[in-house]
Image: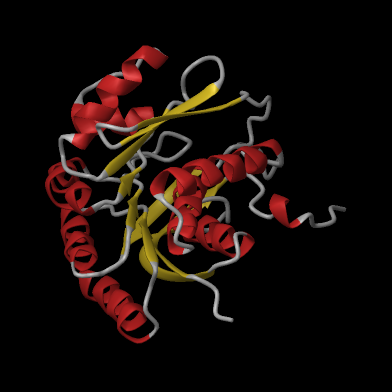
C-alpha cells in the first residue's frame, strides 16, 4: 500500500540537522512518503549558518506544481521562506491545494542567524498565516510577528491570540524557551490543549522546530485531527531530543531515527 504523501517546502541544511533534511528524515521515520520543494540552499554546520542562497521563484513554483499535479499530496509543511516574494508565492500555492498546511514561520536559526528578511514579515502575517491549518511559532517568532513577548507560561494564551488574529485555524505556541517543563499551547481560539514534557538535559537540539512541524504534517496526512497530530508530534520530538547527539564543535541535532529502534555504534 502507498504511504501517506507529505510535502516539505523549505531550505536545505548542509549539516543535516534541520531544514529539508530534517523534514525528510522525520517523514520517513513516521511512515510517510516525503517529497520536497527546495526554497534556499544554506551552508551550515554545528556552529551556525555560513551563507544562504535563495532559489528563484520560478524554480520553487515548478517544483511544487511538478509534485502536486502528478503525485498529489495529503499534507504540506513550510519552513524557511526567506523573502516576501517567496512567502507570497508559497501562500498562493497552498491556497490552491486541497490539503492541510503546517506553517513553521522560520525567522532565525538555532544559532541566532536570520533566515527571514524583515521585509517579508508582513507577507507572513497577511498571506501565509491565513492559509495555515496549523502555525507553529516559537517564542522568538511570536515576538517577531506580533510584538508579544512571552516571559512565563501565563503569557502563552496572549501570544496565541495574537497569532490567531492573522488567520490560521490553529496555532501551536512552542514554549520550549521558557524555564521549567517544555510547555506548548495548542488552540484554535475556543479549544485549548496544553502539552507538557520534562525538560531534558541535552543541548543537542538543532532541528527541533522543523522536526515538530514535519511530524504534525505526517499526522495530518494520516487523517488525524489537529490535536491528535500535534500530541503525537510532541511525543516524537521529545524522544528525538532525548536521543540528540553531538556533532562538530557546536550544537548537535536531534535524532530523527530514534523511534526506529536502530542500533548505534
Identified at 60% across, 59% down, the residue is 30
Quarter in which the N terminus is drawn:
bottom right
- How many discs appear? 0
The relative height of residue 66 versus residue 162 in the rendered view (above or below) is below
Identified at 50% across, 70% down, the residue is 4
On the picture, is 67 further left or further right than 147? right
Identified at 12% across, 46% down, the residue is 126
On the picture, is 240 further left or further right than 144? right
Q: Residue 204, located in which quarter of the rendered image?
A: top right
On the picture, is 194 further left or further right than 27? left
- Residue 101 in sight here: yes
Q: Give coordinates of residue 210: x percent, y percent.
A: 47, 49
Q: Give coordinates of residue 129: x percent, y percent.
A: 21, 47
The relative height of residue 260 versus residue 62 in the rendered view (above or below) is above
Q: From this viewpoint, which residue is outermost toward the right? A: 265
Q: Give coordinates of residue 200: x percent, y percent.
A: 66, 26
Residue in front for this viewpoint, 116 or 262: 262
Give the colour scheme of this rendering: secondary structure
Q: Residue 199, located in which quarter of the rendered image?
A: top right
- Residue 13 in sight here: no
Amino acid at each position: 500500500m502507498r504511504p501517506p504523501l507529505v510535502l516539505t517546502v523549505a531550505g536545505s541544511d548542509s549539516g543535516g540537522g534541520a531544514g529539508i533534511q530534517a523534514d525528510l528524515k522525520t517523514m520517513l521515520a513516521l511512515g510517510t512518503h516525503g517529497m520536497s520543494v527546495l526554497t534556499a540552499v544554506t551552508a551550515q554546520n554545528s556552529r551556525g549558518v555560513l551563507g544562504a542562497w535563495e532559489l528563484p521563484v520560478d524554480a520553487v513554483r515548478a517544483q511544487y506544481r511538478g509534485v502536486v499535479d502528478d503525485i498529489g499530496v495529503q499534507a504540506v509543511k513550510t519552513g524557511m521562506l526567506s523573502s516576501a516574494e517567496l512567502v507570497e508565492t508559497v501562500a498562493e500555492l497552498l491556497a490552491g491545494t486541497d490539503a492541510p498546511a503546517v506553517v513553521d514561520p522560520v525567522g532565525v536559526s538555532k544559532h541566532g542567524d536570520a533566515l527571514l528578511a524583515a521585509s517579508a514579515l508582513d507577507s507572513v502575517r497577511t498571506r501565509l498565516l491565513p492559509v495555515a491549518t496549523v502555525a507553529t511559532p516559537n517564542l522568538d517568532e511570536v515576538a517577531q510577528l506580533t510584538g508579544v513577548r512571552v516571559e512565563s507560561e501565563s503569557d502563552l494564551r496572549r501570544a496565541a491570540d495574537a497569532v490567531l488574529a492573522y488567520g490560521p485555524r490553529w496555532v501551536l505556541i512552542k514554549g520550549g524557551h521558557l524555564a521549567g517543563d517544555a510547555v506548548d499551547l495548542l488552540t484554535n481560539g475556543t479549544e485549548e490543549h496544553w502539552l507538557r514534557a520534562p525538560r531534558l538535559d541535552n543541548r543537542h537540539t538543532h532541528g527541533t522546530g522543523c522536526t515538530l512541524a514535519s511530524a504534525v504534517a505526517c499526522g495530518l496526512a494520516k487523517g488525524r485531527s489537529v490535536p491528535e497530530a500535534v500530541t503525537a508530534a510532541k511525543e516524537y520530538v521529545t524522544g528525538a531530543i532525548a536521543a540528540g547527539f553531538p556533532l562538530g564543535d557546536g550544537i548537535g541535532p536531534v535524532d530523527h531515527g530514534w523511534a526506529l529502534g536502530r542500533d548505534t555504534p
